[in-house]
Amino acid sequence: MAIKVKTKIDKFGRIVIPKKIRDDFGLKNNSEVLLEAGEDGIIHPDSTLAFVMDKDRILVVCSEPTESFTSFLKKERENRIKQIAINC
């Protein structure tokens, strides 16, 4: 469920993000956010930073991947093969 909040821009161009939304998206003092004019909204947490959000009382870690999934799988397979070879 989307949360919609009406707020105002002050004379310096600042917008106050309500505490509930800041908490849900892990936004702290000096957190960077991405402002994007689009159909789905305009304010997003900086996607390069990991944060934890509450989705229906389940904590979900949100972040960008640090490497490709294919690369990760290749490394995991190599490590498993090494472990098998050591145990034989």
Image: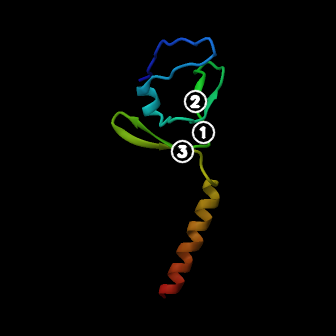
Q: Are marks 1 and 3 in contact (CB under 8 Å)?
A: no
Q: Secondary structure at mark 1?
A: loop
Q: Position of residue 30 (x, y in %)?
A: 57, 35
Q: Quadrant of residue 20?
A: top left
Q: Position of residue 56 (x, y in %)?
A: 35, 33
Quadrant of the drawing holding the N terminus: top left
Quadrant of res 55: top left
The answer to the question of whether label 1 and label 2 lie on touching residues, with beta carbons closer than 8 A, is yes
Give the residue at the far front of this rendering: 12
Residue at 44% from the left image edge and 21% from the top image edge: 3
Q: Earlier in the sequence, mark 2 or mark 3?
A: 2
Identified at 61% across, 53% down, the residue is 66
Separation of marks 1 and 3 at Cα, in angstroms: 7 Å
- Which residue is under mark 1? 47
Residue 26 placement, left or right of 66: left
Q: Is residue 16 above or below residue 48?
A: above
Residue at screen point 51% across, 79% down: 83
At x 50%, y 23%, the residue is: 17
Pinpoint residue 39: horizontal percent, then vertical percent: 61, 18
Frontmost residue, 51 versus 8 = 8
Mark 2 residue type: His
Disc 2: which residue? 44
Could you tell me the amino acid type at mark 3?
Ala
Element on which disc 3 rests = loop
The residue carrying mark 3 is: 50
- Answer left or right for 35 relative to 27: right
Q: Residues within 10 Å of mark 3 (few under 14, many from 20)?
A: some
Q: Amino acid at mark 1?
A: Ser
How far apart, in angstroms, are the residues tagged by discs 1 and 2? 8 Å
**Is there CB contact under 8 Å for labels 2 and 3?**
no
Instruction: Sort mark 1 into few (<14), some (14-19) or many (20+) by Cα contacts within 10 Å.
Output: few
